[in-house]
Image: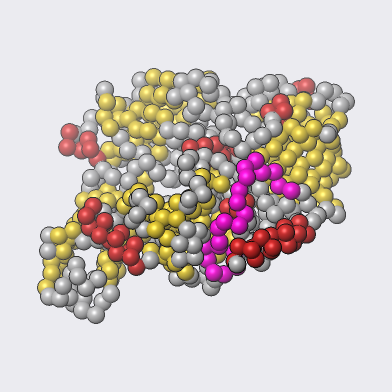
Amino acid sequence: MKRKFLVFLLPLIGLAFAFTNLPGLKPTVRGNYPSNYFQAPVAQALLLSGTFGELRPNHFHAGIDIKSARGIIGDAVFSAADGFISRIKVDKSGYGNSLYISHPNGYTTVYAHLDKFKQEIEQWVKNQQYVQESFEIDVDLTHEKFPVSQGEEIGKMGNTGSSNGAHLHFEVRETSTQNPINPLLFGFRVVDNIAPKMHSLKVYALNEKREELGARAVSLYKSGNTYRVKGDTVLLDAGQTGFGLKVYDHLDRVSNWNGIYELVVYQDDSVIYDFTLESFAFDETRYINAHCDYEERVTKNSYFNRCYSLPGNQLSIYRRKANNGVIDLQDGQASKITMVAADVAGNSTTLEFYAKLKPNAAVLAQPIFNQKYNYVLPFNEGNMIRTEGLYLHMPSGTLYEDLYLKYDVQPERSSNYYSKVHRLNNNRTPVHDYFDIGLRPTQSIPAELKPKVFVAYCEGSRILNCGGRWEDGLLRAKVRDLGAYAILMDITPPTIRQVVFGQNMKGYKQFSFKISDNVASSPNVEPLTYEARVDGKWVLMEYDKKNGTITHYFDGETITPGEHEFSLVVRDAVGNESAFERKFFR
Ligand SMILES: [Zn+2]
């Protein structure tokens, strides 16, 4: 009965969909996705504070962010379809508490930043945490453990992990590859009648190797439904030119600036560049640093989509790249450039202008690497540099284009510097992957203090611990940024601050502490670890990394009524320790 009803209804839904899309274009979709298989993972209307493929620091957003109904945690989260829980992960940052559900149709749905799992899972997770003596767990499960049916409540919406406000991060992945796919291609009902808005155009003068000779922003204005530039023509500084576009999508009933689905660039009548945020692989997500203008992001927190590709950009989201998106104009020649940005609902926006070479452009077309450099590192080769104080090894694939490396050595900045400051360009040059760096100390370090030094990224006023291991008299680390590096020492133990704790814990639901350290660390170095025990036995303390809080919730079993001895040890990345010990009554 139910099925018949659906079949009858389908043509009507199709019709309604076509109407809401007008005027616009059908988004380009390569895959064939079921549009009525999944139900929404929440009961309320889908209001999105983030869309798939949205531009974020060092990654494309892999799902959609669904707003909480009232801005607070606790909304019920439902399984989008029948299946089984195939993975449970508890993470102090990242996705926080997350569930993965595998479905028989070959897709996996992911529910992240949950506050709580449903009771049965919550209990199982806690048991695992005690077995592993770890707050963080990541377990793969087979189908018999937790089968779920469509619409079954699996947990509560939360704010765990790297989340700033109650929301559900929801993903649809292809199970076999774990590649995330744009969830809005699966027929979820999101009201969107608003076309993307264009904010600024960037014009890059390029040389034969697609290296930037100069760049400038051009402001846009809207005339009718089309964006234009002042005077309708952009005068180019070099025959070879690339464009960049700052563009965002907007949805009904939300104020958020969300990501677009598709951008197509035409030179006269031919497509020279496009991208579609239909799907990507997690191991290519960092190519966003080549896709976007990295310097704009780092210096202004502004995202421009590059409409031409850097030589080392291997992202799979582009389908057409004539001449890599670069336009090549001769003196006196003009081209009409059209850019069409669309959202997944098919609302689209157009930018139109003419591009023409400046009469005296030949002068600017000369390479203008007027800043001095000491090394040229080709992007498609491995590169190694050895000097008296520095070892550097970049495997092939680390860079997006040849690097004109300016390397200089500056004196120690204070008595806590155990090496000179080695400056490798600056933080405005993107690097795709970790590379090896080794620094030679300039003063002898007593054996007992050798574990306390670290390779520090000391760009501007920021100090980041990048780790360090000794090899051939050099302190070595894997790093992923260009800028200044030096050897620093840290002998300051972490700080433990009581938030909720006292001698008499009767009637309390939990006890909690704030833990922090004097040195921040790079993403591949764990800044703080902790271990809490009651009467010598490991106890679970949930760690919320974004606010540095660790909390134990009394469960009535682990800590029985009576007197107990609590101990907490917190360790920083170089092994400095702080301890807290106290008796309490429960
Ligand atoms: Zn998200």
Front residue (pair 506, 99): 99
Q: Is residue 405 visible?
A: yes
State yes or no: residue 22 in magenta: no
Q: Residue at x 74, y 53 (%)?
A: 347
Q: Residue at x 61, y 57 (%)?
A: 36
The quadrant of the picture occupied by the N terminus is: bottom right
Front residue (pair 405, 164): 164
Q: Residue at x 87, y 43 (%)?
A: 231
Task: Where is residue 119? Give x, y as percent.
Answer: 34, 68
Q: How is the image coloured?
A: secondary structure
Where is 252 relative to 206, above or below? below
Q: Is residue 300 visible?
A: no
Task: Where is residue 158? Give x, y as percent.
Answer: 44, 64
Say left or right for 122 vs 582.
right
The answer to which image quadrant residue 275 occupies is top right
State the extent of the magenta-drawn residues as a range.
Answer: 26-46
Say left or right for 296 vs 539.
right
The quadrant of the picture occupied by the C terminus is: bottom left
